[in-house]
Image: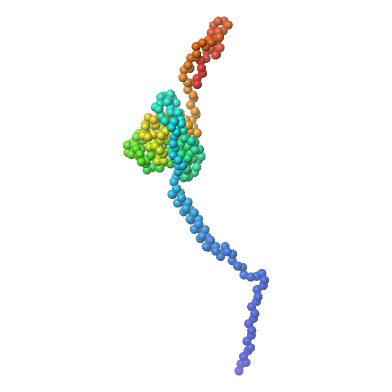
């Protein structure tokens, strides 16, 4: 018969030494996956918000409509640079709004509309833009055609609803576009830099014609006034000229002086004086 052996007491668990406790995972290690997912959601939300703002925000805005003073701020041209007579026109100076280049697609707020200056785009198909008659459903932003103005071009704007949006109005605009003359100073060929014919609703008149810092309002389409405006202001008010300034032409014939004006002093020999002063005209050209 087997004698039962006494049960041995279990060995006491070894106490861990100080300094060897198991390392606890950090907060970042415990939540790495959650943080990555959360960061991705935030980035996607920011991108979606940016896209939404770009799609819903207007390409440009106007603080106020340009209201010219009762008298013309720019003298109505009576003669073109070549001296030919021009019909009377009423053109007005608009305050300069600068000419800073901004990235294509940027939204711009103009102090006055229609803007005859201001921030604008630069680059292929961004500005200066292609000359054309842009129909009522075609986009031609001021940030593009302001660059045409900066180089001496002319812009013709029409408002919708209005005569310019009708079939007859579009026919008139297309006709003047096809008959457009060369520029008066730089002699740019027709339709190379201007005209830009575009819809623009943020103005107080059915039509407006623009040069740099100059606005001519029109209550109805006036072909003669538009061509006179082009002859008077194209190539002439823009801050970035593309050609040399024209040589000043002589002024009108000098008016004779009052009676009693002393005659030129005779030479000692009694003949006419041969000094340059005696041979020169009474007044130099203006």
Which residue ends up furthest to the top in the rendered image?
269
**At which x and y percent is residue 110?**
47, 41
Residue 200 occupies quadrant: top left
268 lies left or right of 49: right
Residue drawn at 44 percent across, 31 percent down: 71
Res 75 seen here: yes
Which residue ends up furthest to the left in the rendered image?
168
**At which x and y percent is residue 137?**
37, 43
**At which x and y percent is residue 90?**
42, 30
**Above-or-below relation of 48 to 128:** below
Residue 83 occupies quadrant: top left
Which residue ends up furthest to the front in the rendered image?
70
269 lies left or right of 229: right
Q: Nearer the viewer, residue 226 or 70?
A: 70
159 lies left or right of 10: left
Res 187 seen here: no
Q: Nearer the viewer, residue 250 or 244?
A: 250
Residue drawn at 50 percent across, 40 percent down: 101
Residue drawn at 58 percent across, 6 percent down: 268
**At which x and y percent is residue 163?**
34, 37
Residue 218 occupies quadrant: top left
**Above-or-below relation of 161 to 84:** below
| Number of marks present in the image shown | 0
Which residue ends up furthest to the right in the rendered image?
18
């Amino acid at each position: 018969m087997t004698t039962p052996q006494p049960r041995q007491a279990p060995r006491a668990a070894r106490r861990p030494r100080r300094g060897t406790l198991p390392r606890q995972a950090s907060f970042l290690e415990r939540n790495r996956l959650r943080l990555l997912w959360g960061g991705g959601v935030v980035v996607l939300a920011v991108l979606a918000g940016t896209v939404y703002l770009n799609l819903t925000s207007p390409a440009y805005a106007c603080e106020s409509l340009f209201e010219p003073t009762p008298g013309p701020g720019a003298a109505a041209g009576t003669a073109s640079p070549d001296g030919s007579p021009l019909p009377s026109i009423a053109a007005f100076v608009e305050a300069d709004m600068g000419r800073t280049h901004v990235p294509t697609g940027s939204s711009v707020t103009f102090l006055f509309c229609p803007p005859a200056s201001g921030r604008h785009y630069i680059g292929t198909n961004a500005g200066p833009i292609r000359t054309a008659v842009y129909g009522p459903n075609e986009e031609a932003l001021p940030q593009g055609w302001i660059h045409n103005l900066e180089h001496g071009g002319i812009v013709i704007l029409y408002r919708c609803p209005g005569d310019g949006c009708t079939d007859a109005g579009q026919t008139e605009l297309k006709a003047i576009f096809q008959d457009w003359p060369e520029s008066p100073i730089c002699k740019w060929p027709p339709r190379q830099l201007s005209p830009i014919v575009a819809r623009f609703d943020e103005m107080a008149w059915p039509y407006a014609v623009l040069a740099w810092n100059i606005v001519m309002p029109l209550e109805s389409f006036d072909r003669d006034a538009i061509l006179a405006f082009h002859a008077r202001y194209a190539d002439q008010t823009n801050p970035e000229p593309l050609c040399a300034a024209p040589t000043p032409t002589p002024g009108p014939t000098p008016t004779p002086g009052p009676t009693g004006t002393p005659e030129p002093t005779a030479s000692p020999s009694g003949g006419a004086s041969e000094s340059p002063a005696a041979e020169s005209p009474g007044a130099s050209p203006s």
